[in-house]
Image (cartoon, rainbow, N blue to C red):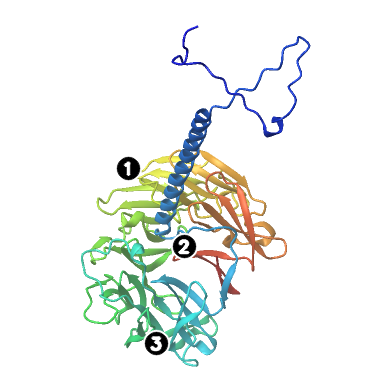
Amino acid sequence: MGDRRGELQDVELVEVDAAELGAPAPARGADGVPPVPRRARDPRRRRRALAAVGLVVAAVVASSAVTTARENARLARLADLPGFLTPINGPMTVRWRADGSTFGGMSAFDGTLLGASFGEGGAAEVVALDPRTGAERWRTEIRAAGVDDSWPGCSFPSEPGDLGDLGDLPGSALPAIVCVVVDESVPTGTIENGQSLVPVRAHLTVLDPTTGAVLDERPTYATAGVAPLGTDIVLTHIDDAGHLQAERLDPLGGQPRWTFRTPDPVSMDDFGYPQGWTTTAEGLVVVRAPAEIDPAVGTWRELAWVLSPDGEVLRSPEPTAAPQADWTEALAGGALIGEHLSTTTGAVATRIVEVTTGRTFTIDGYPVAAGPDDGSLPGLLLAMTENDRSLRAYDLATGEPAWTSSRSGGNDLTRSGSTSTPVALDGRLIQIESKALTAIDGRTGETVWSTPLERPPDSYGGNAATGQLATDGRLILLSEPDPDGGAALVAYAVADGRRLWAADLPGDLYLLPIGGALYGWSGSGVVALG
Protein backbone atom coordinates (compact mmCIF):
# COMPACT_ATOMS: atom_id res chain seq x y z
CA MET A 1 0.00 0.00 0.00
CA GLY A 2 1.48 3.27 -0.92
CA ASP A 3 1.80 6.38 1.23
CA ARG A 4 -1.56 8.32 1.03
CA ARG A 5 -0.63 11.27 3.24
CA GLY A 6 -0.28 13.53 0.26
CA GLU A 7 -3.78 12.78 -1.04
CA LEU A 8 -6.76 15.01 -0.17
CA GLN A 9 -9.67 13.17 1.38
CA ASP A 10 -13.33 14.23 1.50
CA VAL A 11 -14.45 14.67 5.08
CA GLU A 12 -18.08 15.10 6.11
CA LEU A 13 -18.83 16.86 9.38
CA VAL A 14 -21.88 15.85 11.36
CA GLU A 15 -23.60 18.20 13.81
CA VAL A 16 -23.92 16.75 17.25
CA ASP A 17 -26.08 18.40 19.88
CA ALA A 18 -24.70 18.69 23.38
CA ALA A 19 -27.44 16.35 24.57
CA GLU A 20 -26.22 13.67 22.17
CA LEU A 21 -22.72 13.63 23.57
CA GLY A 22 -22.26 10.39 25.52
CA ALA A 23 -25.66 9.08 24.38
CA PRO A 24 -26.00 5.47 23.26
CA ALA A 25 -25.56 4.68 19.60
CA PRO A 26 -28.61 5.46 17.54
CA ALA A 27 -30.98 2.61 16.99
CA ARG A 28 -30.95 0.98 13.62
CA GLY A 29 -34.00 0.93 11.47
CA ALA A 30 -36.02 -2.09 10.45
CA ASP A 31 -33.62 -2.68 7.59
CA GLY A 32 -30.68 -2.52 9.92
CA VAL A 33 -29.44 0.78 8.52
CA PRO A 34 -28.72 3.59 11.01
CA PRO A 35 -30.41 6.97 10.38
CA VAL A 36 -28.70 9.47 8.10
CA PRO A 37 -26.75 12.02 10.12
CA ARG A 38 -27.63 15.73 9.70
CA ARG A 39 -25.39 17.66 7.41
CA ALA A 40 -23.53 20.52 9.02
CA ARG A 41 -24.81 24.04 8.20
CA ASP A 42 -22.49 25.96 5.93
CA PRO A 43 -21.59 29.12 7.90
CA ARG A 44 -20.68 30.86 4.65
CA ARG A 45 -24.17 30.21 3.25
CA ARG A 46 -25.72 31.56 6.44
CA ARG A 47 -23.59 34.69 6.28
CA ARG A 48 -24.59 35.19 2.64
CA ALA A 49 -28.28 34.84 3.52
CA LEU A 50 -27.97 37.27 6.40
CA ALA A 51 -26.10 39.71 4.19
CA ALA A 52 -28.85 39.51 1.56
CA VAL A 53 -31.53 40.13 4.17
CA GLY A 54 -29.51 43.03 5.52
CA LEU A 55 -29.24 44.56 2.06
CA VAL A 56 -32.99 44.30 1.54
CA VAL A 57 -33.69 45.85 4.94
CA ALA A 58 -31.16 48.61 4.27
CA ALA A 59 -32.73 49.31 0.88
CA VAL A 60 -36.21 49.50 2.42
CA VAL A 61 -34.96 51.76 5.22
CA ALA A 62 -33.08 53.97 2.75
CA SER A 63 -36.12 54.18 0.47
CA SER A 64 -38.33 55.01 3.43
CA ALA A 65 -35.86 57.65 4.58
CA VAL A 66 -35.79 59.23 1.11
CA THR A 67 -39.59 59.19 0.94
CA THR A 68 -39.85 60.71 4.41
CA ALA A 69 -37.29 63.38 3.55
CA ARG A 70 -39.16 64.27 0.36
CA GLU A 71 -42.49 64.42 2.20
CA ASN A 72 -40.99 66.58 4.94
CA ALA A 73 -39.52 68.91 2.31
CA ARG A 74 -42.91 69.08 0.57
CA LEU A 75 -44.73 69.92 3.80
CA ALA A 76 -42.11 72.54 4.68
CA ARG A 77 -42.52 74.14 1.23
CA LEU A 78 -46.30 74.22 1.63
CA ALA A 79 -46.03 75.73 5.12
CA ASP A 80 -44.28 78.73 3.56
CA LEU A 81 -47.26 79.39 1.25
CA PRO A 82 -50.15 81.62 2.38
CA GLY A 83 -52.97 79.71 4.05
CA PHE A 84 -51.17 76.40 4.65
CA LEU A 85 -50.56 75.04 8.14
CA THR A 86 -47.31 73.76 9.58
CA PRO A 87 -47.29 69.92 9.78
CA ILE A 88 -49.85 68.49 12.20
CA ASN A 89 -49.09 65.46 14.35
CA GLY A 90 -52.16 63.81 15.82
CA PRO A 91 -55.45 65.23 17.13
CA MET A 92 -55.46 68.94 17.96
CA THR A 93 -56.63 70.49 21.21
CA VAL A 94 -57.39 74.01 22.40
CA ARG A 95 -54.08 75.61 23.44
CA TRP A 96 -55.50 78.95 24.53
CA ARG A 97 -58.49 81.22 23.99
CA ALA A 98 -59.26 84.94 23.80
CA ASP A 99 -62.52 86.84 24.12
CA GLY A 100 -63.89 86.95 20.58
CA SER A 101 -66.23 89.84 21.34
CA THR A 102 -63.27 92.17 21.76
CA PHE A 103 -60.51 90.67 19.63
CA GLY A 104 -60.81 90.82 15.86
CA GLY A 105 -58.97 91.48 12.62
CA MET A 106 -56.27 88.92 13.38
CA SER A 107 -53.07 88.98 11.35
CA ALA A 108 -49.66 87.33 11.74
CA PHE A 109 -46.44 89.27 11.41
CA ASP A 110 -42.89 88.29 12.39
CA GLY A 111 -43.97 85.59 14.81
CA THR A 112 -46.65 87.71 16.50
CA LEU A 113 -50.44 87.60 16.31
CA LEU A 114 -51.90 91.09 15.84
CA GLY A 115 -55.48 92.24 16.27
CA ALA A 116 -57.76 95.13 17.19
CA SER A 117 -59.50 95.13 20.56
CA PHE A 118 -62.83 96.93 20.97
CA GLY A 119 -64.07 97.43 24.52
CA GLU A 120 -66.85 99.07 26.48
CA GLY A 121 -67.56 102.72 25.81
CA GLY A 122 -65.80 102.56 22.46
CA ALA A 123 -62.32 102.02 23.89
CA ALA A 124 -60.05 100.82 21.09
CA GLU A 125 -56.66 99.14 21.37
CA VAL A 126 -54.25 97.18 19.22
CA VAL A 127 -53.00 93.99 20.85
CA ALA A 128 -50.09 91.65 20.10
CA LEU A 129 -50.20 88.05 21.35
CA ASP A 130 -47.73 85.19 21.46
CA PRO A 131 -49.26 82.69 18.98
CA ARG A 132 -47.95 79.72 20.99
CA THR A 133 -49.33 80.65 24.39
CA GLY A 134 -51.75 83.53 23.87
CA ALA A 135 -49.70 85.63 26.28
CA GLU A 136 -49.94 89.36 25.67
CA ARG A 137 -46.76 90.90 24.26
CA TRP A 138 -47.97 94.47 24.11
CA ARG A 139 -51.17 96.54 24.10
CA THR A 140 -51.52 100.11 22.81
CA GLU A 141 -54.57 102.34 23.22
CA ILE A 142 -55.65 104.16 20.08
CA ARG A 143 -58.88 105.66 21.48
CA ALA A 144 -60.09 106.14 25.04
CA ALA A 145 -63.52 105.05 26.24
CA GLY A 146 -66.33 107.58 25.93
CA VAL A 147 -64.99 109.31 22.80
CA ASP A 148 -66.82 107.41 20.05
CA ASP A 149 -68.08 103.87 19.57
CA SER A 150 -67.18 103.30 15.90
CA TRP A 151 -65.00 100.31 15.13
CA PRO A 152 -61.50 101.46 14.08
CA GLY A 153 -60.29 100.52 10.62
CA CYS A 154 -56.76 99.09 10.83
CA SER A 155 -54.27 97.98 8.20
CA PHE A 156 -51.82 95.34 9.42
CA PRO A 157 -48.49 94.59 7.70
CA SER A 158 -48.34 91.45 5.58
CA GLU A 159 -45.82 88.66 5.64
CA PRO A 160 -43.37 88.98 2.71
CA GLY A 161 -44.87 86.01 0.84
CA ASP A 162 -48.32 87.61 0.85
CA LEU A 163 -47.40 90.93 -0.75
CA GLY A 164 -47.63 90.16 -4.46
CA ASP A 165 -46.21 92.45 -7.16
CA LEU A 166 -45.98 95.95 -5.70
CA GLY A 167 -44.69 97.75 -8.76
CA ASP A 168 -41.55 99.79 -9.24
CA LEU A 169 -42.10 102.43 -6.57
CA PRO A 170 -40.10 101.92 -3.36
CA GLY A 171 -42.22 101.26 -0.31
CA SER A 172 -41.80 102.42 3.25
CA ALA A 173 -38.61 101.25 4.89
CA LEU A 174 -40.54 100.15 7.97
CA PRO A 175 -43.66 97.98 8.14
CA ALA A 176 -46.35 99.55 10.30
CA ILE A 177 -49.84 99.14 11.69
CA VAL A 178 -52.06 102.00 10.50
CA CYS A 179 -55.48 102.68 12.02
CA VAL A 180 -58.15 105.21 11.06
CA VAL A 181 -59.82 106.11 14.36
CA VAL A 182 -63.07 108.08 14.42
CA ASP A 183 -63.17 110.69 17.19
CA GLU A 184 -66.66 112.08 16.63
CA SER A 185 -69.82 110.97 14.82
CA VAL A 186 -73.12 112.79 14.33
CA PRO A 187 -76.55 111.50 13.29
CA THR A 188 -77.81 112.20 9.80
CA GLY A 189 -81.18 111.63 8.20
CA THR A 190 -84.62 112.08 9.74
CA ILE A 191 -86.40 110.38 12.60
CA GLU A 192 -89.20 109.33 10.24
CA ASN A 193 -86.96 107.78 7.60
CA GLY A 194 -84.24 106.57 9.91
CA GLN A 195 -80.92 107.94 11.00
CA SER A 196 -77.31 106.93 10.61
CA LEU A 197 -74.18 108.00 12.43
CA VAL A 198 -71.54 109.49 10.17
CA PRO A 199 -67.99 110.46 11.17
CA VAL A 200 -67.04 114.13 11.24
CA ARG A 201 -63.62 113.93 12.89
CA ALA A 202 -60.90 111.25 12.82
CA HIS A 203 -57.19 110.70 13.28
CA LEU A 204 -54.54 108.35 11.94
CA THR A 205 -52.42 106.29 14.37
CA VAL A 206 -49.26 104.52 13.20
CA LEU A 207 -47.74 101.79 15.40
CA ASP A 208 -44.56 99.74 15.37
CA PRO A 209 -45.77 96.12 14.90
CA THR A 210 -42.88 94.76 16.95
CA THR A 211 -43.15 96.91 20.07
CA GLY A 212 -46.52 98.67 19.82
CA ALA A 213 -44.82 102.06 20.10
CA VAL A 214 -46.71 104.98 18.54
CA LEU A 215 -44.67 106.12 15.55
CA ASP A 216 -47.04 108.86 14.40
CA GLU A 217 -50.45 110.29 15.21
CA ARG A 218 -52.09 112.95 13.06
CA PRO A 219 -55.55 114.18 12.04
CA THR A 220 -57.02 112.67 8.89
CA TYR A 221 -60.14 112.94 6.78
CA ALA A 222 -63.38 112.02 8.54
CA THR A 223 -64.32 109.87 5.55
CA ALA A 224 -60.92 108.14 5.40
CA GLY A 225 -60.39 104.46 4.83
CA VAL A 226 -57.09 102.60 4.70
CA ALA A 227 -55.85 99.53 2.84
CA PRO A 228 -52.37 97.94 2.90
CA LEU A 229 -50.10 97.89 -0.14
CA GLY A 230 -46.87 96.22 0.89
CA THR A 231 -45.27 98.43 3.52
CA ASP A 232 -47.21 101.43 2.16
CA ILE A 233 -50.91 102.22 2.53
CA VAL A 234 -53.64 103.45 0.22
CA LEU A 235 -55.66 106.16 1.97
CA THR A 236 -59.10 106.89 0.50
CA HIS A 237 -61.44 109.79 1.27
CA ILE A 238 -64.20 111.95 -0.19
CA ASP A 239 -62.89 115.42 -1.00
CA ASP A 240 -64.80 118.68 -0.54
CA ALA A 241 -66.21 118.49 -4.07
CA GLY A 242 -67.61 114.99 -3.48
CA HIS A 243 -65.00 113.12 -5.54
CA LEU A 244 -63.44 109.90 -4.28
CA GLN A 245 -59.68 110.27 -3.92
CA ALA A 246 -57.07 107.56 -3.30
CA GLU A 247 -53.41 108.15 -2.38
CA ARG A 248 -50.49 105.80 -1.96
CA LEU A 249 -48.57 106.93 1.10
CA ASP A 250 -45.68 106.05 3.33
CA PRO A 251 -47.44 105.43 6.68
CA LEU A 252 -44.93 107.71 8.41
CA GLY A 253 -45.92 110.69 6.26
CA GLY A 254 -44.48 112.65 3.38
CA GLN A 255 -45.90 113.42 -0.03
CA PRO A 256 -48.18 110.89 -1.76
CA ARG A 257 -46.40 108.60 -4.21
CA TRP A 258 -49.43 109.02 -6.47
CA THR A 259 -53.01 110.32 -6.27
CA PHE A 260 -56.12 109.18 -8.12
CA ARG A 261 -59.41 111.14 -8.22
CA THR A 262 -62.69 109.98 -9.74
CA PRO A 263 -63.82 112.10 -12.71
CA ASP A 264 -67.20 112.85 -11.14
CA PRO A 265 -68.61 113.18 -7.63
CA VAL A 266 -69.72 109.89 -6.10
CA SER A 267 -73.30 108.98 -5.22
CA MET A 268 -74.89 109.61 -1.85
CA ASP A 269 -76.55 106.97 0.30
CA ASP A 270 -80.11 107.23 1.61
CA PHE A 271 -78.89 109.48 4.43
CA GLY A 272 -77.08 111.90 2.14
CA TYR A 273 -73.63 110.53 2.94
CA PRO A 274 -71.14 110.06 0.07
CA GLN A 275 -69.99 106.49 -0.51
CA GLY A 276 -66.68 105.11 -1.73
CA TRP A 277 -63.89 102.81 -0.67
CA THR A 278 -60.71 101.10 -1.87
CA THR A 279 -59.53 97.51 -1.69
CA THR A 280 -56.10 96.08 -2.42
CA ALA A 281 -55.54 92.49 -3.49
CA GLU A 282 -53.23 90.54 -5.78
CA GLY A 283 -51.02 93.62 -6.13
CA LEU A 284 -53.85 95.74 -7.61
CA VAL A 285 -55.78 98.70 -6.22
CA VAL A 286 -59.54 98.80 -6.86
CA VAL A 287 -61.22 102.16 -6.22
CA ARG A 288 -64.98 101.65 -5.84
CA ALA A 289 -68.01 103.91 -5.80
CA PRO A 290 -71.68 102.94 -6.03
CA ALA A 291 -73.64 104.11 -9.05
CA GLU A 292 -77.40 104.43 -9.32
CA ILE A 293 -79.71 101.44 -8.85
CA ASP A 294 -80.20 99.66 -12.17
CA PRO A 295 -84.00 99.47 -12.62
CA ALA A 296 -83.67 96.51 -15.00
CA VAL A 297 -82.23 94.22 -12.33
CA GLY A 298 -83.08 96.12 -9.15
CA THR A 299 -79.53 96.12 -7.76
CA TRP A 300 -76.81 98.69 -7.21
CA ARG A 301 -74.22 98.99 -9.91
CA GLU A 302 -70.63 99.76 -9.02
CA LEU A 303 -68.21 102.14 -10.66
CA ALA A 304 -64.71 100.72 -10.31
CA TRP A 305 -61.28 101.87 -11.38
CA VAL A 306 -58.46 99.33 -11.28
CA LEU A 307 -54.99 100.74 -10.70
CA SER A 308 -51.54 99.23 -10.76
CA PRO A 309 -49.39 99.56 -7.62
CA ASP A 310 -47.68 102.46 -9.41
CA GLY A 311 -50.99 104.31 -9.84
CA GLU A 312 -51.54 103.58 -13.54
CA VAL A 313 -55.24 103.23 -14.40
CA LEU A 314 -55.62 99.76 -15.91
CA ARG A 315 -59.39 99.64 -16.16
CA SER A 316 -62.16 102.25 -16.00
CA PRO A 317 -65.95 101.81 -15.90
CA GLU A 318 -67.49 100.76 -19.19
CA PRO A 319 -69.52 103.29 -21.19
CA THR A 320 -73.10 103.66 -20.02
CA ALA A 321 -74.40 101.52 -22.88
CA ALA A 322 -72.34 98.53 -21.76
CA PRO A 323 -73.39 96.31 -18.84
CA GLN A 324 -72.09 97.80 -15.61
CA ALA A 325 -70.57 95.57 -12.97
CA ASP A 326 -72.17 94.86 -9.61
CA TRP A 327 -68.69 94.65 -8.14
CA THR A 328 -65.11 94.21 -9.33
CA GLU A 329 -62.25 92.10 -7.99
CA ALA A 330 -58.64 91.25 -8.79
CA LEU A 331 -57.90 87.64 -9.77
CA ALA A 332 -55.03 85.29 -10.61
CA GLY A 333 -52.25 87.22 -8.95
CA GLY A 334 -53.40 90.48 -10.51
CA ALA A 335 -53.32 89.16 -14.08
CA LEU A 336 -57.12 89.25 -14.37
CA ILE A 337 -60.02 91.45 -13.32
CA GLY A 338 -63.45 89.99 -12.63
CA GLU A 339 -66.49 92.22 -13.19
CA HIS A 340 -69.67 90.63 -11.83
CA LEU A 341 -72.84 91.19 -13.84
CA SER A 342 -76.48 90.59 -12.92
CA THR A 343 -79.02 90.01 -15.68
CA THR A 344 -82.75 90.62 -16.01
CA THR A 345 -83.31 86.86 -15.69
CA GLY A 346 -81.58 86.76 -12.32
CA ALA A 347 -78.59 84.85 -13.65
CA VAL A 348 -75.12 85.92 -12.65
CA ALA A 349 -72.19 86.13 -15.05
CA THR A 350 -68.70 87.57 -14.74
CA ARG A 351 -66.77 89.47 -17.36
CA ILE A 352 -63.09 88.46 -17.16
CA VAL A 353 -60.56 91.06 -18.30
CA GLU A 354 -56.91 90.25 -18.97
CA VAL A 355 -54.98 93.19 -17.55
CA THR A 356 -52.04 93.25 -19.98
CA THR A 357 -53.99 92.80 -23.23
CA GLY A 358 -57.54 93.95 -22.46
CA ARG A 359 -58.89 90.64 -23.80
CA THR A 360 -62.29 89.78 -22.31
CA PHE A 361 -64.52 86.73 -22.03
CA THR A 362 -67.60 85.98 -19.97
CA ILE A 363 -68.17 83.06 -17.62
CA ASP A 364 -71.30 81.75 -15.94
CA GLY A 365 -71.52 82.43 -12.22
CA TYR A 366 -68.69 84.04 -10.33
CA PRO A 367 -64.97 83.29 -9.88
CA VAL A 368 -63.85 81.17 -6.96
CA ALA A 369 -60.32 81.49 -5.65
CA ALA A 370 -58.93 78.26 -4.21
CA GLY A 371 -57.68 78.65 -0.70
CA PRO A 372 -55.12 77.64 0.13
CA ASP A 373 -53.55 77.11 -3.29
CA ASP A 374 -50.18 75.43 -3.93
CA GLY A 375 -50.02 76.71 -7.53
CA SER A 376 -50.28 73.24 -9.08
CA LEU A 377 -53.12 74.21 -11.46
CA PRO A 378 -51.85 77.15 -13.51
CA GLY A 379 -53.90 78.30 -16.47
CA LEU A 380 -57.27 77.46 -14.91
CA LEU A 381 -59.94 79.82 -13.58
CA LEU A 382 -62.46 78.30 -11.18
CA ALA A 383 -66.06 79.47 -11.08
CA MET A 384 -69.23 78.62 -9.18
CA THR A 385 -72.44 78.61 -11.19
CA GLU A 386 -75.30 80.52 -9.59
CA ASN A 387 -78.19 78.17 -10.40
CA ASP A 388 -76.87 74.79 -9.22
CA ARG A 389 -73.61 75.80 -7.52
CA SER A 390 -71.54 73.55 -9.73
CA LEU A 391 -67.78 74.01 -9.69
CA ARG A 392 -66.53 74.75 -13.18
CA ALA A 393 -63.04 75.32 -14.58
CA TYR A 394 -62.22 77.62 -17.50
CA ASP A 395 -59.14 77.49 -19.69
CA LEU A 396 -57.56 80.94 -19.41
CA ALA A 397 -55.90 80.60 -22.81
CA THR A 398 -59.23 80.24 -24.63
CA GLY A 399 -61.86 81.41 -22.16
CA GLU A 400 -63.76 78.17 -22.77
CA PRO A 401 -65.04 75.77 -20.09
CA ALA A 402 -62.59 72.94 -19.38
CA TRP A 403 -64.91 70.85 -17.19
CA THR A 404 -67.80 70.96 -14.74
CA SER A 405 -67.70 68.88 -11.58
CA SER A 406 -70.10 65.97 -12.01
CA ARG A 407 -70.82 65.76 -8.29
CA SER A 408 -72.15 69.30 -7.94
CA GLY A 409 -75.77 70.16 -8.42
CA GLY A 410 -78.95 71.29 -6.73
CA ASN A 411 -80.56 74.61 -5.95
CA ASP A 412 -79.81 74.83 -2.23
CA LEU A 413 -76.31 75.59 -1.01
CA THR A 414 -76.87 73.75 2.25
CA ARG A 415 -78.56 70.76 0.65
CA SER A 416 -76.31 70.02 -2.29
CA GLY A 417 -73.73 71.60 -4.52
CA SER A 418 -70.48 73.08 -3.24
CA THR A 419 -70.44 74.40 0.32
CA SER A 420 -66.77 75.24 0.81
CA THR A 421 -63.92 77.08 -0.83
CA PRO A 422 -61.86 74.46 -2.69
CA VAL A 423 -58.31 73.64 -1.64
CA ALA A 424 -55.86 73.35 -4.56
CA LEU A 425 -53.22 70.75 -3.74
CA ASP A 426 -51.03 68.50 -5.90
CA GLY A 427 -53.17 69.06 -8.99
CA ARG A 428 -56.40 68.24 -7.16
CA LEU A 429 -59.26 70.32 -5.82
CA ILE A 430 -60.69 69.26 -2.47
CA GLN A 431 -64.03 70.63 -1.30
CA ILE A 432 -67.36 69.75 0.26
CA GLU A 433 -69.90 68.70 -2.36
CA SER A 434 -73.32 67.16 -1.82
CA LYS A 435 -72.68 66.24 1.83
CA ALA A 436 -69.34 64.60 1.00
CA LEU A 437 -65.71 65.64 1.15
CA THR A 438 -64.53 65.20 -2.42
CA ALA A 439 -61.24 65.39 -4.31
CA ILE A 440 -61.37 65.95 -8.05
CA ASP A 441 -58.67 65.97 -10.69
CA GLY A 442 -58.05 69.63 -11.42
CA ARG A 443 -57.32 68.96 -15.10
CA THR A 444 -60.28 66.73 -15.94
CA GLY A 445 -62.90 67.34 -13.26
CA GLU A 446 -63.11 63.61 -12.57
CA THR A 447 -63.66 62.46 -9.00
CA VAL A 448 -60.54 60.96 -7.41
CA TRP A 449 -62.16 60.06 -4.09
CA SER A 450 -65.27 61.00 -2.14
CA THR A 451 -65.98 60.47 1.55
CA PRO A 452 -69.54 60.90 2.90
CA LEU A 453 -69.57 63.23 5.89
CA GLU A 454 -71.09 61.88 9.09
CA ARG A 455 -72.10 65.40 10.06
CA PRO A 456 -72.25 67.74 7.04
CA PRO A 457 -71.86 71.48 7.71
CA ASP A 458 -75.62 72.12 7.55
CA SER A 459 -76.48 69.34 10.04
CA TYR A 460 -78.21 70.27 13.30
CA GLY A 461 -78.42 73.92 12.31
CA GLY A 462 -74.68 74.24 11.79
CA ASN A 463 -73.77 77.24 9.66
CA ALA A 464 -71.52 77.68 6.64
CA ALA A 465 -68.60 78.42 8.94
CA THR A 466 -68.29 74.71 9.62
CA GLY A 467 -67.67 74.13 5.91
CA GLN A 468 -64.32 75.90 5.96
CA LEU A 469 -61.36 73.64 5.16
CA ALA A 470 -57.77 73.85 6.40
CA THR A 471 -54.76 71.73 5.44
CA ASP A 472 -51.09 71.11 6.08
CA GLY A 473 -50.76 69.20 2.78
CA ARG A 474 -51.24 65.80 4.40
CA LEU A 475 -54.49 66.27 6.32
CA ILE A 476 -57.72 68.07 5.45
CA LEU A 477 -59.33 69.57 8.55
CA LEU A 478 -63.02 70.34 8.82
CA SER A 479 -65.21 71.64 11.64
CA GLU A 480 -68.34 69.49 11.81
CA PRO A 481 -71.38 70.29 14.02
CA ASP A 482 -72.99 67.91 16.48
CA PRO A 483 -76.58 67.58 17.79
CA ASP A 484 -75.73 69.32 21.08
CA GLY A 485 -74.68 72.58 19.47
CA GLY A 486 -70.98 71.85 19.68
CA ALA A 487 -68.59 70.80 16.95
CA ALA A 488 -65.66 68.53 16.27
CA LEU A 489 -62.45 69.12 14.34
CA VAL A 490 -62.20 66.14 11.99
CA ALA A 491 -59.10 65.15 9.99
CA TYR A 492 -59.21 63.36 6.64
CA ALA A 493 -56.29 61.99 4.63
CA VAL A 494 -55.44 64.06 1.56
CA ALA A 495 -54.32 60.92 -0.30
CA ASP A 496 -57.57 58.94 -0.14
CA GLY A 497 -60.12 60.78 2.01
CA ARG A 498 -59.98 58.37 4.96
CA ARG A 499 -61.35 59.74 8.24
CA LEU A 500 -58.37 59.69 10.60
CA TRP A 501 -59.36 61.35 13.86
CA ALA A 502 -61.75 63.79 15.51
CA ALA A 503 -61.34 66.21 18.43
CA ASP A 504 -64.00 68.17 20.30
CA LEU A 505 -64.26 71.91 19.69
CA PRO A 506 -65.84 74.51 21.98
CA GLY A 507 -68.70 75.43 19.65
CA ASP A 508 -69.33 75.99 15.96
CA LEU A 509 -66.06 77.58 14.81
CA TYR A 510 -64.87 79.18 11.61
CA LEU A 511 -61.36 77.86 10.94
CA LEU A 512 -58.69 80.52 10.38
CA PRO A 513 -55.20 79.50 9.23
CA ILE A 514 -52.93 82.41 10.19
CA GLY A 515 -49.16 82.34 10.02
CA GLY A 516 -49.07 78.55 9.70
CA ALA A 517 -51.16 78.01 12.85
CA LEU A 518 -54.87 77.14 13.12
CA TYR A 519 -57.38 79.26 14.99
CA GLY A 520 -61.13 78.98 15.41
CA TRP A 521 -63.42 82.00 15.58
CA SER A 522 -67.03 82.42 16.65
CA GLY A 523 -69.05 85.17 18.24
CA SER A 524 -68.13 83.88 21.67
CA GLY A 525 -64.39 83.56 21.33
CA VAL A 526 -61.17 82.92 19.47
CA VAL A 527 -59.29 79.72 20.21
CA ALA A 528 -55.83 78.56 19.18
CA LEU A 529 -55.63 74.90 18.14
CA GLY A 530 -52.54 72.75 18.20
Name the element at disc 2: strand
Instruction: Please identify the quarter of the rendering in which residue 7 is found.
Output: top left
Residue 515 visible here: yes
Question: Residue furthest toward the top?
Answer: 1
Rendering quarter of residue 184: bottom left
* Residue sitting at x 36%, y 67%: 159
First-in-chain label (1 vs 2): 2
Q: Check the picture and name the quadrant holding the C terminus.
A: bottom right
Task: Kindly report the distance in space between the C-alpha atoms of the residues bearing marks 3 and 1.
Answer: 49 Å
Tell me whether the residue at label 3 lies in contact with that at label 2, contact meaning CB atoms closer than 8 angstroms. no
> Alpha carbon of mark 1 to alpha carbon of mark 2: how far?
32 Å
Q: Say if 473 sits above or below 517 in the image.
A: above
Say which quarter of the image contains residue 27.
top right
Looking at the image, is mark 1 or mark 2 nearer the viewer?
A: 1
Residue at the location (59% across, 54% down)?
A: 491
Residue 270, position in %: x, y?
A: 46, 76
Q: Which mark is residue 397?
A: 1
Mark nearer the N terminus (3 vs 2): 3
Name the residue type under label 3.
Val
Q: Which mark is residue 200?
A: 3
Q: How many marks?
A: 3
Measured from the top left, where is residue 95 in percent x and y? 57, 70
Q: CA distance from mark 3 to mark 2?
A: 29 Å
- Which amino acid, mark 1? Ala
Question: Residue 331, percent across and down?
Answer: 36, 56
Asked whether residue 364 is in view, the answer is no
Closer to us: mark 3 or mark 1?
1
Q: Which residue sits furthest bottom?
A: 146
- Of circles 3 and 2, the one toward us is 3
Which numbered disc flags the more N-terminal residue, 3 or 1? 3
Mark sitting on residue 299: 2
